Image: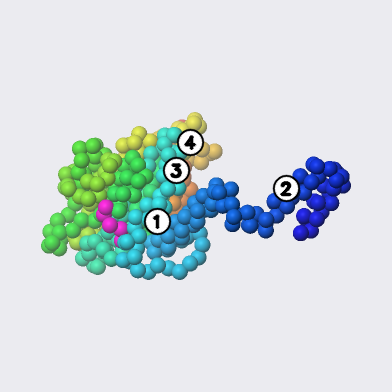
């Protein structure tokens, strides 16, 4: 009322008692909330556009509330707090609404497609009420699959490949639902990670890869080639299989059986972090190779002085290293493993015997400093004074 009276006095003061001032007063009256409310009651057609907006907003609020409940049921932290929907049956009935959660992701993927970015959906097999195969010591396939999926997604961060997980925690999703997630995103590729099993404990060992459609064969073969080199397990080959997740997806899709969880030695490897990291590195390289994509930003644009790194192990082997600000950097995996170290990759850093160290990515490969090899595994390093670009590295005593 105060604002109305001030505006009324201002109008009279400026215009006097003229026709224009009378019109201005009418407009002021029409702007008042009570007048507007009464007009809506008797002349609703005047506010049809506003009613449409309100109806749309109300509908969106309902959708957001449903999404919030579903996110909570899946263990995903929503933006607001609320009661947890614990009923798994209710979760399954409302699963179709989960696809609405992908709308912002889909928009982001469309933006990425305007660049060189590719999208891969990584499916952690089983989950929730479905433990998958059980190992000889009681390990569960669903746990292995989730760990590997999350590690692979983390490894691809910063590259030209965007990874989307079908599940990020111990949640059960129907097979058709996993395929729908990838199809909804219009992903460029799909992989499902599993551990194999047979009816008889310890009767089979090795790595195999499945695909269904012919357009998936090349993708499956590249994945398998890299995975075999990393696992060191027997090669069970690339096979055609009528599997739901590779059949119902509309993009190149493969299902990976990394090893047999009910084979004692395979099981030990499957749950060894160093082994997992090695397989993840291989799968990441396979995915990048298939897409012809670049890895994380590297120092390719910088011309570092090269160094000749010779590892004096069982057989002498020579590698290319770099001198960066008077520090010697060497390729982590080949050099480290020749020296008897366990080389992994976690959260953007190379690990030596489980210890994360300073890392540089050069030409898509991880490099570490020579001094870290000395401090962690006791490697002995000698520089040739007559030829400073040459370095000899010996295994610690």
Indicate which label's residue lies in the foreground, 1 or 2: 2
- The disc placed on residue 299 is 4
Point out residue 240 in the picture as x, y percentages from the top left corner: 16, 44
Mark 4, secondary structure of its residue? loop
The residue segment tinted magenta is 171-176
Check disc 2: other Cα within 10 Å, few if <14, some if 14-19, many if 20+: few
Label 4, label 1: how far apart the Cα atoms are: 25 Å
Residue 279 appears in the picture as rendered: no
Label 3, label 4: how far apart the Cα atoms are: 31 Å
Mark 2, secondary structure of its residue? helix
What residue is disc 2 on?
27
Label 2, label 4: how far apart the Cα atoms are: 66 Å
Asked if labels 4 and 3 touch by Cβ distance under 8 angstroms, the answer is no
Among the two numbered marks 2 and 3 on one chain, the one whose residue lies closer to the N terminus? 2
Among the two numbered marks 2 and 4 on one chain, the one whose residue lies closer to the N terminus? 2
Name the image quarter holding residue 283. top left
Verify whether residue 174 appears in magenta.
yes
Check disc 1: other Cα within 10 Å, few if <14, some if 14-19, many if 20+: some
Point out residue 104 in the picture as x, y percentages from the top left corner: 45, 47
Indicate which label's residue lies in the foreground, 3 or 4: 3
What residue is disc 1 on?
354
Check disc 3: other Cα within 10 Å, few if <14, some if 14-19, many if 20+: few
Compared to residue 305, the image places residue 365 above or below, namely below
- The disc placed on residue 107 is 3
Q: Residue at x 50, y 32 (%)?
A: 302
Decide if residue 94 is on the left or right side of residue 254. right
Residue 2 appears in the picture as rendered: yes
Decide if residue 356 is on the left or right side of residue 31. left
Indicate which label's residue lies in the foreground, 2 or 4: 2
Asked if labels 1 and 4 touch by Cβ distance under 8 angstroms, the answer is no
Label 1, label 2: how far apart the Cα atoms are: 74 Å
């Amino acid at each position: 009322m105060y604002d109305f009276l001030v505006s009324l006095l201002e109008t009279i003061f400026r215009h006097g008692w003229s026709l224009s001032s009378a019109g201005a007063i009418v407009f002021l009256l029409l702007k008042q909330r009570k007048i507007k409310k009464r007009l809506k009651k008797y002349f609703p057609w005047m506010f049809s556009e506003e009613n449409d907006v309100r109806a749309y907003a109300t509908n969106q609020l309902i959708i957001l509330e449903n999404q919030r409940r579903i996110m909570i049921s899946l263990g995903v932290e929503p933006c607001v707090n609320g009661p947890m929907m614990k009923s798994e049956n209710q979760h399954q009935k409302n699963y179709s609404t989960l696809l609405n959660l992908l709308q912002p992701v889909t928009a982001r993927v469309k933006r990425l497609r305007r660049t060189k970015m590719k999208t891969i959906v990584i499916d952690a097999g089983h989950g929730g009420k479905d433990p998958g195969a059980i190992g000889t010591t009681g390990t569960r396939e669903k746990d292995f699959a989730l760990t590997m999926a999350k590690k692979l997604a983390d490894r691809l961060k910063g590259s030209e490949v965007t990874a989307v997980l079908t599940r990020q925690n111990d949640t059960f999703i129907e097979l058709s639902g996993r395929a729908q997630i990838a199809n909804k995103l219009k992903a460029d590729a799909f992989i499902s990670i599993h551990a194999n099993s047979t009816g008889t404990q310890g009767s089979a060992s090795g790595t195999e890869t499945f695909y269904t459609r012919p357009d998936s064969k090349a993708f499956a073969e590249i994945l398998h080639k890299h995975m075999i080199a990393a696992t060191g397990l027997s090669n069970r080959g690339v096979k055609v299989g009528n599997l739901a997740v590779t059949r119902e997806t509309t993009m190149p899709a493969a299902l990976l059986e990394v090893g047999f969880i009910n084979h004692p030695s395979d099981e030990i490897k499957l749950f060894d972090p160093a082994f997992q990291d090695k397989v993840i590195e291989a799968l990441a390289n396979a995915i990048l190779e298939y897409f012809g994509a670049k890895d994380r930003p590297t120092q390719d644009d910088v011309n570092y002085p090269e160094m000749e790194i010779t590892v004096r192990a069982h057989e002498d082997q020579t590698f290319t290293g770099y001198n960066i600000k008077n520090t010697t950097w060497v390729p982590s995996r080949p050099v480290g493993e020749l020296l008897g170290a366990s080389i992994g990759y976690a959260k953007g850093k190379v690990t030596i015997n489980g210890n994360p160290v300073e890392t540089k990515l050069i030409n898509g490969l991880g490099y570490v400093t020579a001094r870290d090899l000395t401090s962690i595994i006791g490697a002995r390093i000698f520089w040739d004074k007559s030829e400073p670009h040459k370095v000899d590295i010996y295994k610690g005593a």
